[in-house]
Image (cartoon, helix red, strand yellow):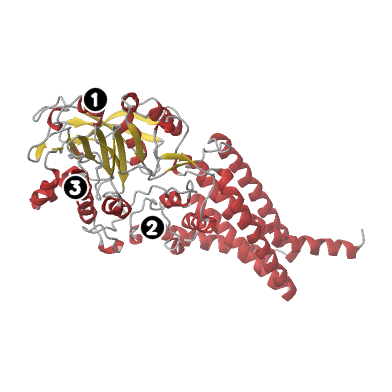
Amino acid sequence: MTEREKTAGKAAGSKMAGAWLCIAVCFMLFLYAPLELLFTNQDEFWFDAYILTPPMLVVFAAGCGCGILLFALLGKLHEKTYRIGLAAGLTGYLGLYIQGNFLAEGLPTLDGELIDWSLYSGERIKSVIAWAAVAAVVITLFCKLRGEVFARVVRGVSIGMTLMLGLTLLTLAVTNDGFSKKPGMSVTTENMFDMSRDTNFVILLLDAVDAQTLEGMMEAEPEYQDIFTDFTFYNNVVAAYPYTQHSIPYILSGSWYENEKAFKEYEKEAYASSPFLETMENAGYRMGFYEAELLPDNGGMGRFENILSNDRGVEDTWAFVRWQMLMTGFKYAPYDLKRFSFVNPKAFSTLKITPEGKTLFTPSNIAFYDGVLHEELRIGDQKCFRFIHVDGGHVPFIYNENVEEIPEESGSYEDNLRACLTMTKAYLKKLREGGVYDNSVIIVMADHGYNWLDPHGRQNPAFFVKGVNETHDFAVSDAPVSFEDLQEAYQRLLNGADGGSVFDWKSGDQRDRRFLFYEYLKEDYMVEYIQPGQAHDTEAMYETGNIFSR
């Protein structure tokens, strides 16, 4: 090979460094990051890799094309300009990698709550130090190495890290069942306001309504108590889990999940083998399950008349891609840019393709309230079971007492609870006016409590209940009740019991009640607590030493 050929080869290799860097950056941001998030949070998203990958491949290809074109233009301008571009690109690539893979643990969770970024100043300092260190290393290499040597370093780092991330992604896919295809099923609003002139069993679940907080509001404003005439309010209830995902299958099945298997396997079995649901089905109830966070599976879902098959895919591909990129930005962007990358992962449920002519169920308080006010209540002969889960008191705090959306910064938890009371009042009024209130078992409850000062203080949910043809003034009981008692309570209600006699426990009884705590998005590590005192008393709870982890 002649000297000219060697020189030409080195020049070509140098030019290829820019292309490899573009491929590396785009692979990490547009393929690795969203797929890694999906594989490690399979139970949080309704879509799978087969739905996620095609649009992100388009973004990957477009990003590579634009990046390669940019480096080609830099090369045309001047060789040094091209090398400066390589240095800047390598700095950005390494900085993003470190930010997203080593500095993400201390970030706030994306649960819809307004983020106070001033609480994370330590994360900002770590971010600045990391980016400064990366920039110093790259600048040193840029100054010390010849142009073609520096280009080879960039190319080697790009190829090596891409292979490493690719192998990591493959491992995550294998270990997290990433190659499975999720069924195309949607939770619709179909028949939500269909009721029976025979018998109805209604569970209206208002998310994150804390019993103690709500009771304080009802004592301060007694007119709220009038909403629950005929009901018994149990203010001393201990839930099962601190968050919705595990609480709802437990509420309907009575089966504990202790990380002994994949959660989606448990969820499938819980709904498919629930004694309560089986009893309702055998008794001939039309069953509706209005739960937006449900990951519909074939197991047990066919019994619900509102869960329908649909085409797999997304309604709005651009919004789907944009939200994926925002979530990537929240994890990988430098600290001061993260606040512009906020998206609530629950929003993805609104992008699922809906069966033709149907409406996708959404937990929005406003959507439910609008339905209560404007949808026709259709009365039939067959008995009906309705389980309806709406946002209730859950963050973000964007509802006022009239169930209107307000700016999050001006809202409060109490405002959300007032919206809950308004919705409940309107729903009960609708049932009364439709002539199906008296012949209905009605439970108004929360899946867990809420405490904005202590994440452990979510064990005391609100619970109201009335039986068929039950009439009396609003009643309150401080009997030590647990979600472990729900299955027997349901059966007693089906047998004609009133709300005040569905539990064996009475006021003044002492009892140890179980609660499994975990941190949000860290459900693979559960800690068992016992509550020997009043449900709301977090200080009375103690750890048993039992840990359930995967």
Residue 429 - label: 3
Q: Counting other residues with Cα less than 10 Å from the Cα at mark 2, is it few (<14), some (14-19), or many (20 or more)?
A: few
Mark nearest the camera among 3 and 1 is 3
Task: Classify 10 Å Cα crowding around label 3: few (below 14), some (14-19), many (20 and above).
Answer: some
Residue 550 in view in this figure = no
Which type of secondary structure does the marked residue at label 1 adopt? helix
Residue identifier under label 1: 491
Q: Is residue 267 above or below residue 55?
A: above
Q: Are marks 3 and 1 in contact (CB under 8 Å)?
A: no
Identify the residue under disc 2.
Answer: 122
Q: Quadrant of residue 211?
A: top left
> Residue 292, how many percent across, how many down?
39, 44
Residue type, numbered disc 2: Gly
Q: What secondary structure is found at the residue carrying circle 3? A: helix
Q: Which mark is residue 451?
A: none
Q: Residue furthest bottom?
A: 77
Q: Is residue 311 left or right of residue 350?
A: right
Amino acid marked by disc 3: Lys
Q: Quadrant of residue 406?
A: bottom left
Disc nearest the viewer among 2 and 1: 1
Tag 1: residue type? Gln
Nearest to N terminus: mark 3 or mark 1: 3
Residue in the picture at 23% in, 51% down: 423
Q: Indicate left or right for 344 with 438 as reference.
A: right
Residue at the image point whose x is 26% and y is 26% from the top: 487
| Marks 2 & 1, CB-CB < 8 Å contact | no
